[in-house]
Amino acid sequence: MSNYPPGVTGNEPQIAGYPEFDQNVDCQAEGVTVVTMSPEAYKRAAALVDEVMRSARQGLLVPSGTAFRLQNEIADGEEVDLVSCPFEGDVTSWVDQGIVFWECPLCRTVHEADWDPEGFDG
């Protein structure tokens, strides 16, 4: 049993206390699939998720219409296969047991490399 919320393990960098730092990276992960949706569909889906969470906090059942509308918003997402991920930008990296990790915010690939503590100023 854990006191962490659902989906939280305690091994997350922010909780476990691993050194963190920001760095600029190029992802270029190969053969990834991302799901796209319009900004309007994303906002509608986020509003529906908020509605579901409010119901859950109040101990209420989620109205079936809300669940159906959320399912429709998600279904409007389109899977896109990428030869290589085009992400280039800043990410927060963390260090664990001599390895630097970072997750691409676009394709969600977790990357790792040997850590050079000489270059770390955090």
Image (cartoon, rainbow, N blue to C red):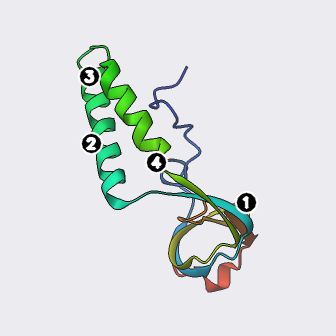
Q: Which residue is mark 2?
A: 47
* Whether label 2 touches label 4, CB < 8 Å: no
User: Is label 3 in a helix, a strand or a loop?
Assistant: helix
Q: Could you give the CA–CA distance between mark 3 and mark 2, rounded to whole angstroms?
A: 13 Å
First in sequence: mark 1 vs mark 3: 3
Front one among 38 and 85: 38
Whether 43 is drawn above or below 87: the answer is: above
Number of the front mark, 1 or 2: 2
Q: Could you give the CA–CA distance between mark 1 and mark 4, rounded to whole angstroms?
A: 41 Å
**What's under tag 1, amino acid-wise?**
Gln
Q: Which mark is residue 55?
A: 3
> Which residue is painted at 44% across and 31% down in the image?
5
User: Is label 2 in a helix, a strand or a loop?
Assistant: helix
Looking at the image, residue 21 sits to the left or right of residue 66; the answer is right
> Which residue is painted at 37% across and 27% down in the image?
67
Crowd tier of the residue under label 3, counting other residues whose Cα lies within 10 Å: few below 14, some 14–19, many 20 or above: some
First in sequence: mark 4 vs mark 3: 3
Q: Which residue is mark 1?
A: 97
Q: Could you give the CA–CA distance between mark 1 and mark 3, rounded to whole angstroms?
A: 42 Å
